[in-house]
Amino acid sequence: MFRNRRRSKEDFAEEIRTHLALEADELASSGLSSREASRRARATFGSIPAAREQFHLRSRIAWIEHLSQDLRYALRALIQSPAFTSTAILTLALGMGANIAIFSLIDAVLLRSLPVQQPDQLYFLKYAGAKGIGLAPPYPCFERLHAQSKSFTSMAAFAGGPYELKVRIGGSLERAFGTRVSGDYFTTLDLQPVAGRLLTPADQQLAPATAVISYDYWQRRFGLNPAAIGSNFTLDNTRFTIVGVAPRSFHGLFPGHQADFTLPMTTMLLGPHDGAGMLADTGSPWFDIVARLKPGTSPQQARAEADTIFQSYMQQYPMPPDLRRDVFNHMVLVPASRGIDDLRKQYSRPLLALMFVVALVLLIACANITNLLLARAVRRQREFAVRVALGAGRSRLVRQLLAENTLLFTLGALAGACLAAFAIHAIDHFFSSGSQPITLDVHMDWRLAAFTAAIALLATLLFGAAPILRALRTDPNSALKSGAQTTTSNHKFSGIDLGRALIVLQIALSLILLVGASLFLRTLNNLYAIDAGFQPEHVLLSTIQLLESSYPGETQRISAWSRILDRIRSIPGVESAGVSEMTPLDGSGRHVGFQPNGGAAGGLNMNTVSEDYFATTGTRLIRGHSFTQSDNLASPHVAILNQSAVKEFFPDRDPLGVTVHVNDDATYQIVGVVQDVKERGLRQDAGSFIYLPFRQPYDRNFRMTLSVRTALNPEALAPTIQKLIQSSGPDILITRTETLTEQLDSSVAQQRLISALASIFGLLALVLSAIGLYGVLACSVLARTREIGIRLALGELPSRILRGFLTETSRLIILGSAIGIPASLLLARAANSLLYGVTSNNFATQILCLAILAAVALGASLLPAHRASRINPMEALRME
């Protein structure tokens, strides 16, 4: 191309010289001297540099004009083939839309950095040992690091992931989420407020108490009213003033979880909890540290300095050598550019597995498009031959086809982006619902735009190349001598039948996706089939908070819970009701020390429950008896163990009647044994549990969950139950209402997401493969019409024609399965950690998926095969 451009410039220069020479010769023939003739010729011609500039301008305009012509012609060609265009765009939209949607999740969960200035300079400071990395060192050590460290421009502590708050604002008690931070928190992150100001070290003073709210809370609660700045709310009997609004895009350092309120760390001293003890505790870690590295300082230098300060601190507080070695050995710096990585640890493997799945779907879709383009190129061979015969160069032909392919794949990518927007909304709703909602900031930005453009360009270059190569191989003489119908349709390159090879690839990939979807569905089914120790059907859960200032005494709280239970039990249709500190699969837990008389000490989990809790959740009583209303403060303290606790602490004796000690400061007598209940996850062991009656509480129970079993639809009773709860006393806040079935679903959210999406993509791959197979066979029938007509005219039976096409389909299925089955075994083994109760080499699943795929493929081939067997020989022989 550049050589042609240089030749054009040289030709133009030679043309100017020739013109001037001819003009000078004509003037010289009239009697002028040669010098004067040359001068007048140049004067008549005008400015030569201007002529050159005009020539270059026309060249550039011509290039733009040619591009515009190519695009207009490509658009007309696509409009004139609506069936082909709509099929191709829909196929591409499905494949690309799936990829864009899953990539948006990967971007939000795994790739996106915090919306702060220079996030790569942020590091978490954590202690570490032989058993791994922990949290930040105790708060007094943080204060020493903050004062003595020279490697960081600033450093801050923060606590809360975030945690629940009960705030009174605008006269009503509301549930919110908050985090507590040291004064340099926003300075370290280098953030600017949307309104008002952010927290500073001066806000560490206890009076006046201040807070910063998130942009989303400002929008949701105040409607973006500027008057929110300076307004007040009450928390833990302390009056706080809202001084500012955090940036809109900033949701905290825990991706997926947003803090409505950001409070100074020292406000822990104002609450009813032991905040002063936590801040002064020299040995307990309970928060994190984030610091911004000073420019010019390496992370290794900063770590060495922090470790020196940490070692000096630890020397003042001796601890057992094994604990020091295993846990508190040294300091490490962990990159903080993406925040705390809890969400990434939970969803990284599932999302990467789904990205692999949608990549296979896109391959199937693009293979379909390649077959469509090849078939279209076969039908257009006569057109290509005519254009070549009329003088069109091969490069012009390639440019035209490239413009058509680019336009087609671009339209497919745009349609895919629109489909992805709907899919993203649905997936975002999936994450934000349930008992443990996850807030993902998923939106179209430059990353998604770049990803969309990249896959569109890559697909254009890779899968649009085959028809271009086909056009380049067009022989004008042979194409013009025969009609399009007699032109071969095998699309052979180097002896390979490309169309059928792509179908084999589609069958193999579809089989892989179907096997994967089946394994994930069986995993989810196996999880639901686990005996988790409770019956979730027809149980409604309502988490209730009592405000500490309104219920300061133990008797008052017990009376409030009893009053709520009495009112709920009186509702028609309610079979039983109970309260508890934790419910099955809510993800919480509380570990306490445990010492039975005459037995070894240890630890287990504790739950405080009411007398009808086990009957409400459907947990079986194995031995002894359950709690009663007479198990109160005036009666002997009693407790119930689960089966795992009996196996651990009473392997060779009867636990009933044995006195046990909890944390060395409370004594209970065992009166019953219940079955194990999975509290944290279906994949995890139930663990050892001790249950205490709520009328004999171990400590203050301001927060309990009401469980209600009903013969009716529990969701229909929810409004009545909520109304009765709130009318049972002042300052009662309902923070969450859902069914126990929904809580069970939330506990397997990861498996549900994988199973649902893998099933959708598996079915999509099956449909695309069927369409691709139908297209190839239909094109084959069209191209072989004369051949089939001749065979029928010579006496071949239509059934043999039909059987021949079905046999061809069977060969493709066999070849595809020969590739797909071993590949699915290998990939299932790689995803073995995501499976439960099913092995990766489950041949029954392979056979079932292969049978489904074969049935669909044979069904897709039946129509073109039947059409081939019904061809009229006389009409076929007359076709050209």
Image (cartoon, helix red, strand yellow):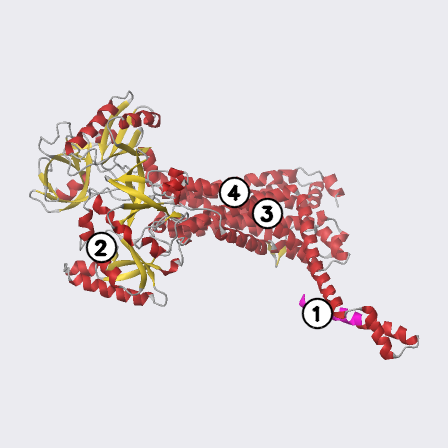
Q: Earlier in the sequence, mark 3 or mark 4?
A: 3
Q: Which mark is residue 6?
A: 1
Kind of residue at badge 4:
Leu
In the picture of the structure, the residue carrying the numbered disc 2 is 139
Q: Do tag 3 and tag 4 residues touch (Cβ < 8 Å)?
A: no
| Marking on residue 832 | none
According to the image, label 3 marks what residue? 411
Residue marked by disc 4: 419
Q: Are marks 3 and 2 in contact (CB under 8 Å)?
A: no
Tag 2: Cα neighbours inside 10 Å, few (<14), some, or many (≥20)? many
Q: CA distance from mark 3 to mark 2?
A: 57 Å
Residue at 18% across / 60% down in the picture? 324
* Percent of width and height locating residue 195: 39, 47
Residue 544 percent location from the top left of the image: 26, 33
Badge 1: residue crowd in 10 Å (few <14, some 14–19, many ≥20): few
Cα–Cα gap, marks 4 and 1: 47 Å
Predominant SS of the magenta segment: helix
Mark 2 or 1, nearer chain start: 1
Q: Quadrant of residue 538?
A: top left
Residue type beneath disc 2: Tyr
